Image: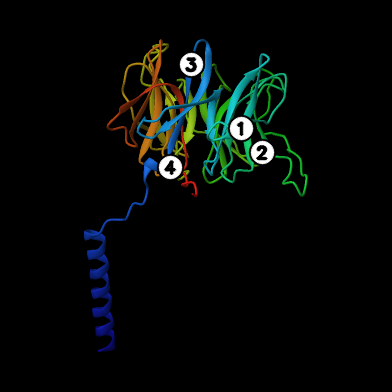
Amino acid sequence: MKKFFNCVFVAILFGVLLMVGLFSKPVVHSDLSKTKIAYVMYEEGSSFIYVMNSDGSNKTKLTAGSMPCWSPCGKKIAFTAEKNNNRDIYYMDSDGSNIFRLTTHPDGDVNPAWSPDGSMIAFNSSRSGSSQIWRTNVTDGDGKETWGYNLTQLTQDTSHKRVNNYHSWSPNGLWLAFEADRDRDDPEIYLVNAVDGTNQQRLTFTRALDEVPEWSFDSKQVIFSSDMHSEPKSGNYDIYIMDIDGSNLKRLTNIEGQASNPSMSPDGTKIVYDLSNGRESEIYVMDADGANPKSLGKGSNPAWSPFLKEKSK
């Protein structure tokens, strides 16, 4: 008898759980109106960093520069700027104030990628002989203690000068995704351990140009641009997404022109990217599955912010 009542209890509990699963929906707390998109505009031969609301409104110029990247708290933006014919990594407050120069090397540093804990920035530099991925602390101390910038080279030069660049840092902090042209003059997507540059893994084998990888919000997928479905040298690129082992490859766009520089919203529901027709570039936003593309206006190299906290009054 006791066994019978236990079975009845389990059946009732299972039924309740099933009803909850069927008739209730998870509560989504994300509000993309509390995010912004940083991007680049070219004006009179120079590049400038702008920010706008996620719907394309309230476009605001911040400073001269390119390749913007948000800090994980959303309070700062790292970027590349050229001064005295040399490019270096800078960062500033998200309103364009308090600009700080992080690197100073004559060979030039570009493409900053902020670590998810906010303490480090990875960047590309040719200071070792060819374009490789390096990492530095954002500051050399906290005012009470000095620990140094701890500059570290994560990928290595080869005798044939193959490059490893255009990286992005996974939200869980474990990996950098990057492009590399190691075996031919066509970049493929790789992963590397963000701590010490070990455990490098190749994700694409397409004999196409697979470029500018970015991450999904949960670190489970990599988004990138490729011409794998186009004729060689056609100039047509689309946005793709795959799991971090290279499986489950999906094509998200199917359009004429060069779709590139994808960036996912912090809730994983949208992807922003730029689309160039060879003359000018526009910024588009679409659903994470590629549906409902919409132009947000002219610009390139978009980067979606984390959720931004309202300023205290």
What amino acid does circle 4 point to? Answer: Pro
Distance Cα–Cα, label 2 vs label 3: 28 Å
Residue at 47 percent of width and 42 percent of height: 306
Whichever of labels 2 and 4 marks the residue nearer the N terminus, that label is 2
Give the quadrant of residue 208.
top left
Q: Nearer the viewer, mark 2 or mark 3?
A: 3
Residue for badge 3: 42
Q: Residue furthest bottom?
A: 1
Residue for badge 4: 266
Distance Cα–Cα, label 3 vs label 4: 27 Å
Question: 17 and 88: which one is in front?
Answer: 88
- Direction from residue 194 to residue 50 in the image, left or right: left
Q: Are marks 1 and 2 in contact (CB under 8 Å)?
A: yes
Distance Cα–Cα, label 4 vs label 1: 21 Å
Q: Which mark is residue 138?
A: 2
Q: Secondary structure at mark 1?
A: strand
Disc 2 packing (10 Å; few <14; some 14–19; many ≥20): many
- Direction from residue 21 to residue 185 in the image, left or right: right
Distance Cα–Cα, label 1 vs label 2: 9 Å
Q: Residue furthest front?
A: 313
Residue 272 is situated, as x and y percent measured from the top left of the image, at: 39, 31
Q: Secondary structure at mark 3?
A: strand
Residue 110 visible in image? yes
Whichever of labels 1 and 3 marks the residue nearer the N terminus, that label is 3
